[in-house]
Image: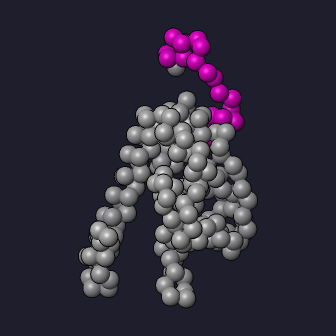
Amino acid sequence: MLKSILNPFRRSYNSEELNLFGFLQKVRLFERLSYEEMALFVPYLYLRQYKNEEAVFFRGDPSHALYIIKSGEIALNIDVKDKFEELSRIYPGDAFGDNTVIENATRIFTSVVVSDNAELYVIPQVNLLQIMNDNTVIRAKVMTSFAEIYNAYSANLVKSYRNHFGFFDLSLAYKRR
């Protein structure tokens, strides 16, 4: 509050923008960003509608966008031979396709809508990377969150292996080439 009093030229936000920023601050990749930093992403947030059983993307697709669930439920699946196995279900406020922060990455799982409908915010990779390249502080904050997310994934993988020793070859998870 004191900051806005001291700086009369600071941009103010309407209630719709403030609600959007509150929503985005709950997304791990954006949790460290200020409202001013989040405002840079707003012009590139596209709201898309999806229906039950509609695929958002498939494993192997280029990672060209980040998705944030506004409403609905998404299953993240891996394909094993000709069957799908559900890795996780994600809900409003969750982001997926976060490897879009890595240039030339491809999707490592398939995402499918499992609720009747879903509303997803989509941020194209080209816009996400441009903002990060133009703003090193934003890049550092987003990449720190990204590293923490992937560290948690790795910790969960090792924990799962310990609990189910012998069901898969953990050395393949850390294969260098």
Q: Position of residue 39 (x, y in %)?
A: 60, 34
Q: Residue at x 46, y 37 (%)?
A: 138
Which region of the structure is painted magenta?
2-20
Left/right placement of residue 170 relative to residue 86 reads left
Residue 166 vs 133, above or below: the answer is: below
Residue 69 visible (yes or no): yes
Left/right placement of residue 111 relative to residue 50 reads left
The residue closer to the viewer here, 108 or 8, is: 108
The residue most toward the bottom is 82
Q: Position of residue 46 (x, y in %)?
A: 69, 49
Quarter of the figure with residue 16: top right
Q: Please tell me how many numbered marks the rendered image carries.
A: 0
Q: Position of residue 117 (x, y in %)?
A: 72, 65
Q: Position of residue 18 (x, y in %)?
A: 63, 34
Colour mapping used in the image: one colour
The residue closer to the viewer here, 51 or 45, is: 45
Task: Give the quadrant of the C terminus.
Answer: bottom left
Residue 168 vs 155, above or below: the answer is: below
Q: Residue at x 54, y 41 (%)?
A: 130
Residue 122 vs 160, above or below: the answer is: above
Residue 172 vs 62, above or below: the answer is: below
Residue 32 visible (yes or no): no
Quarter of the figure with residue 154: bottom left
Q: Residue at x 52, y 49 (%)?
A: 27
Q: Is 14 a magenta residue? A: yes
Q: Is 65 a magenta residue? A: no
Quarter of the figure with residue 36: top right
Q: Residue at x 57, y 68 (%)?
A: 61
